[in-house]
Image (spheres, rainbow, N blue to C red):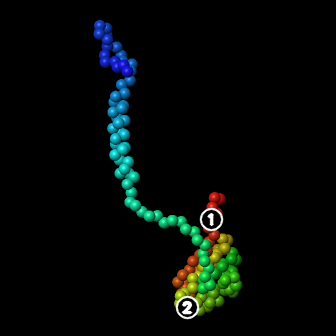
């Protein structure tokens, strides 16, 4: 590899050197490389945390669980039997709230039902003294 040090002897003129001096570029790049190598371990250092795993298990309906369904017109169903109104629902729930252990109430609301209908069932559960109220939903389809 050849290197130009200066003008040839005897020419006397200053000639323009057309070669690019890459030494400063290499020096800057090496300094940047060293800086990145030093700072990358600091950036990737994190606090070890165990994240929860996704577990989707179907709900096991126990005989003591109560399934209440609300259709889109506001009809209330107690384990597939129609309940005439919230007063009758309150009476049935009040009888169950004194049991030990208290049964769980699972509410299934129609997608097109107004929130008001489901809210009345929740309020009735609260007034009757039911401690465990849950909602049953359909999980979203995978891959679609």
Residue 91 placed where, x, y %?
61, 91
Residue farthest front in this picture: 1
Is residue 102 shown above or below 144? below
User: Residue at the spot x=66%, y=73% of the render?
Assistant: 110
Location of the N terminus by quadrant is top left
Residue 117 % position (x, y) = 63, 78
* Quarter occupied by residue 75: bottom right
Find residue 118 and report its horizontal and vertical position in percent. 62, 77
Position of residue 79 measured from the top left corner of the image (x, y, whole percent): 67, 83
The residue under label 1 is: 140
User: In percent of the image, x 60 and y 88: which residue is there?
Assistant: 93
How many residues crowd around disc 2 within 10 Å: few (fewer than 14), some, or many (20 or more)? Answer: few
Q: Is residue 123 visible?
A: no
Which numbered disc flags the more N-terminal residue, 2 or 1? 2
User: On screen, 96 above or below 39?
Assistant: below
From what the image shows, is residue 127 above or below residue 41? below
Q: Quadrant of the C terminus?
A: bottom right
Q: The residue tagged with tag 1: helix, strand or loop?
A: loop
Q: Residues within 10 Å of mark 1 (few under 14, many from 20)?
A: few
Mark number, residue 22: none
Residue at coordinates 37% horizontally, 27% vertically from top-left? Answer: 22
Which of these two is toward me, 101 or 82?
A: 101
| Disc 2: which residue | 99
User: Foreground: 69 or 138?
Assistant: 138
């Amino acid at each position: 590899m050849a290197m130009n040090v200066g003008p040839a002897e005897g020419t006397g003129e200053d000639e323009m050197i057309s070669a690019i001096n890459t030494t400063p570029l290499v020096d800057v790049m090496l300094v940047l490389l060293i800086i990145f190598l030093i700072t990358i371990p600091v950036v990737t250092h994190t606090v070890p945390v165990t994240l929860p795993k996704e577990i989707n298990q179907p709900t096991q309906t126990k005989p003591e669980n109560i399934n209440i369904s609300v259709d889109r017109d506001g009809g209330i169903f107690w384990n597939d039997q129609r309940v005439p109104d919230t007063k009758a629902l309150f009476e049935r729930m009040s009888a169950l709230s004194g049991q030990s252990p208290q049964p769980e109430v699972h509410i299934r609301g129609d997608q097109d039902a107004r929130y008001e209908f489901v809210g009345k069932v929740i309020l009735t559960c609260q007034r009757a003294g039911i401690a465990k109220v849950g909602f049953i939903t359909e999980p979203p389809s995978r891959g679609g």
